[in-house]
Image (tube, rainbow, N blue to C red):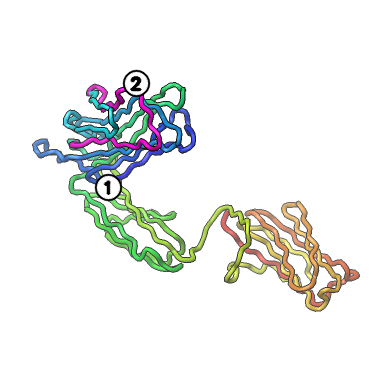
Amino acid sequence: MSVVIQTQSVDTDAADDDPLLSYTVTTTPSPLKASPENPQAPEEIGEIVISVARQSGTPADVEWIKVKVPAGAMAPDLATDLAKISPRISLTGWTVRLDAAAKEFVFAPAASHAPIGPDNGFTIQLSDIPMSRKVGTAPVTVTERSRTGTKAFKTRPTVFNLGKFPADFYLRNFLCEPSIIPNGGDVHLGWERSANATYELLYGDVNRDVTNRTSLKLEGIRSDTTFYLRATTGDPTNPVVRILSAQVTVLKPDLDIGNLTVNGSITLNGPVEGPTLIQDLSNGTWRAHYKAESYGMLVLNSFNSNEGGSGIDFIPTFKVNGVEGRATVPSFGMETSSILLRKGDEADVSISFRGTGGRVPAGYIGKLYWIPLGIG
């Protein structure tokens, strides 16, 4: 079943001219088939079902709903003859007529308008559609004339692009096995398809031509991934596209994120990977300079084994792009101070001591590390 969805805001009108109703279009067969080009051959028959709902709690008043179906012999035409189509609507008291000149089916209530609320979902059905004989994409326009409250009625269109595929085209049974894997596991993708189209596999930043394949093994998957299999056929000026998807879930996946806000605690059950020792400050060199090549954290680990608890403080000073920040840290045990850097930031780190009479504390160990957090 082919599904095309258009939704409306559940709160208020996102824009004043946006549709107040939401629409889901399904077709039978899926996808729709173009009729044979031979005019003597019988036409393929299709069906469109439009499911309509009001998602907001406030009812919308509707004067009419029109469904425009392009008809003719060209690729953008859906039907050959609108008079052969059987239209119906599930709402009681509504009628339907064909405006042949406008190529529209007009659905309207008996009164001047009717309220459609969240409990008034309904369907519009176009059956017995004699399909056009040209492969291509046909724009079907659903237009409502509606309002909320005492506002003026407005005409609000929505366009659904429906593909008509060659009669012998098929793309089905796109599967990812297994569907749940450990971090770094492998998956096998398989599908069934006809030969009269080009096929692409898309996932993440990958776009791979799989026209001559019906299966593919992928190794080392480390995060939840959705795979898309895209088929394209027909005239390049008006192609038809069909997309199927399959997913794999990775247990304990790697994460590649942008901003991260943590309002609670963080527990690390393994070592932090990727720290790079920038400079050992234990040899009497108490200054360091570093330019960040990515977004990350500059970390200073200091440890005083011999004079811990003696009132001695070490004072790390971080200067980033000329702006200074300073923290005073007691020198007993292991102490860590850090600063977050953006790509291109330049940091100068220096250490001074208080309570030592100007000397370096005996047993002092200091190491400066860089932990990259991304490429941004």
Which of pointers 1 and 2 lies earlier in the amino acid sequence? Answer: 1
From mark 1 to mark 2, how far is it between C-alphas? 35 Å
Residue 100 visible, this angle: yes
Please provide the residue range marked out in magenta. Answer: 100-128
Three-letter residue code for mark 2? Ser
Q: Nearer the viewer, residue 5 or 170?
A: 5
Q: Taking 95 as reference, is 15 left or right?
A: right
Q: Nearer the viewer, residue 220 or 82?
A: 82
Q: Secondary structure at mark 2?
A: loop
Please give the name of the residue rendered at 40% of the width and 37% of the height, measured from the top-left corner. 118
Q: Position of residue 45 (x, y in %)?
A: 17, 40
Three-letter residue code for mark 1? Met
Which labelled disc corresponds to residue 112?
Answer: 2
Q: Nearer the viewer, residue 168 or 66?
A: 66
Which labelled disc corresponds to residue 1?
Answer: 1
Determine the residue located farthest toward the left in the rendered image.
Answer: 40
Residue 237 visible, this angle: no
Q: Nearer the viewer, residue 114 or 45?
A: 114
Q: Position of residue 15 (x, y in %)?
A: 47, 31
Q: Residues within 10 Å of mark 2 (few under 14, many from 20)?
A: few
State which quadrant residue 289 falls in: bottom right
Q: Residues within 10 Å of mark 1 (few under 14, many from 20)?
A: few
Please give the name of the residue rendered at 41% of the width and 67% of the height, measured from the top-left corner. 181
Q: Taking 13 as reference, is 293 left or right?
A: right
Q: Position of residue 126 (x, y in %)?
A: 23, 35
State which quadrant residue 273 falls in: bottom right
Please give the name of the residue rendered at 71% of the width and 57% of the height, measured from the top-left corner. 347
Please, is residue 71 above or below residue 203 in the view?
A: above
